[in-house]
Each structure stands twice: as structure tokens, then as C-alpha cells.
Image: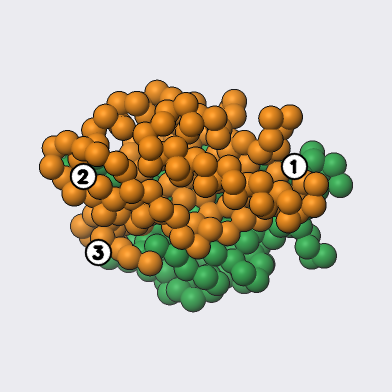
Chain colours: A green, B orange
Amino acid sequence: MAATASEKAIRQVIEARNAALAAKDVAGVMASGAAGFVSYNLAPPLKASGGKVGLAGWFATWDGPIGHEMRDLKIVAGDQIGFAHGLIHMSGRKLDGEVVDLWFRQTFGLKRSSQGWKIIHEHGSVPYYMDGSFRAAIDLKP
Amino acid sequence: MAATASEKAIRQVIEARNAALAAKDVAGVMASGAAGFVSYNLAPPLKASGGKVGLAGWFATWDGPIGHEMRDLKIVAGDQIGFAHGLIHMSGRKLDGEVVDLWFRQTFGLKRSSQGWKIIHEHGSVPYYMDGSFRAAIDLKP
């Protein structure tokens, strides 16, 4: 498989995952990942394994659809291993009334298996302000 | 080059980079990266390119050495492309008196060139508390 074919396949996996997140489709999100998945999430702890735990509960905290759009997606891939990164705009309203309008960074690590390309590592974050406040920078725009 | 040889070479690049950061060695840090480097840093903005800008100035804010130790480094690599992730413990004292004792997550994306493996993407972060405070979680331990 040429690198460009790998990149095309990886783009499809990431776009399907983003669509599943927007649709609150737990099975769809899980289908993009593989065993051994290690994630560094927006929320604590520092590191999590698996992913299904918590996803349905998190979806249930949203009032209506979740906006989940990716920008500046860059994919670097060989025949078997690849990584990708870009910015995600998450938006919508939570059941508690919070209005979410958040840009964050997302990095994926992927591996090709007999079932196609699968995400085995995910890192999502915002930076934080170095002004002594230690506030998460949830108000940045690209 | 077998995947295990790639992993060994990538480990050396990351360890050399960590050592250069601890030694405040700008040239050493820069040597681990390649053109097109995109970084998602602990500090804003969301996304930065290059890396040399700011590094010398940041080193100058430390009073003495920078502790920079990596744990749980996992490397996944093919012949030409790889990625790696782990937890970093950064510690020391800043000139303004702040005592740093921070665990954060770090992901690297790497590509093999004629000059060997080079880091072309870096993502460092802490999560933030979802309790309405939006505080960066700088007090987590692995």
C-alpha cells in the first residue's frame, strides 16, 4: 500500500470517527480504535486505556447534537504505521446549560491491521495560561 | 530497517532530546527535529511551527537545572514513520521562585530521513478539571 493510499484510508477512519462522535454513536467511535488503545484526554486522569467506559455517559450530558469539526488535518503514514494531527472545534449545549464552543488539538497514532487502519493512540488537549492562573486556554481560536 | 531497529533508533532520538532539554541545550533540542515541525505546546497558542523561537528565552527563566524525566515511553514504528508517547516529569525552580513539579503527557510523531529519525510533530499537555473551574490539572501524578 503506497503512502498516499495509507493517508487516504486514515483520513476516512478519522472522518468516520468524528462523524460518530457528532452522532453520539458509541459503537461507531469504538470501531475506529483497536486493542491496546491509550488515550490522553481533555479530562483527567493523565492517561486512560480502552475508551468505551464513560463515552455513553458523556454523550448523555449533551442537550442535542455535538458539533465536532476538524481543521488542518495533517496525515503522515507509511505502509503499516501512521500518525495524524489537527484542530477540532467542539460545540453545542450541555444539559446543565453550559454552552460549549471549544477549539482543541488532537493527535492520533494509527496502525494497519487485517481489519484496516485503527487508532491505537489519541491525545486531545488545550494549552494553559502561563500567567500564574493555570487556567485551561478554552477560549483560543485558530 | 526492521521495526525493532526503528524503535531503538527512535528511543535514542527521544532520550537525546530529553537530555538536551534538561541541559538547556538549544542546538541539541533543535537537532532532534526536522523541517515542517508542528508543535502543540503546554503554553498557548493552539499550534506552533518551528521551535527555536522561545526556547532560549524559556531556558533562561529557570534557576538551575531542569528535571526532565520520561516514564512509560511506548514507541510504535514502521520503516519510515513512527509515533511515541509517554509521561514526562518536569521539575525544578524558576527564577521567579515558582517550584515546578509537573507531570504531563507527550506524544511525538517521527519520520526517517537521510539524517536518521527526526521528530516532526510534538504534542505536550495536561488535562483540565471538568468541575466548572477550567483549571489545568497540574497536580496529577501517574
Which residue is disc 1 drawn over?
B80
Callout 2 amino acid: Arg
Q: Secondary structure at mark 3?
A: loop
Give the mark, 3 or 2, whose residue is nearer the N terminus: 2
Callout 1 amino acid: Gln
Q: Is residue A36 left or right of residue A130?
A: right
Q: Is residue B27 left or right of residue B76?
A: left
Which residue is disc 2 drawn over?
B93
Q: Residues within 10 Å of mark 1 (few under 14, many from 20)?
A: many
Callout 3 amino acid: Asp
Mark in the foreground, 3 or 2 = 2
| Viewer-side residue, B79 vs A81 | B79
**Chain hosting mark 3:** B
Residue A38, image x, y percentages: 54, 64
Which residue is disc 3 drawn over?
B131
Could you tell me how far apart the alpha carbons at marks 3 and 1 are, in whole angstroms?
42 Å
Residue A138 shows up from this direction: no
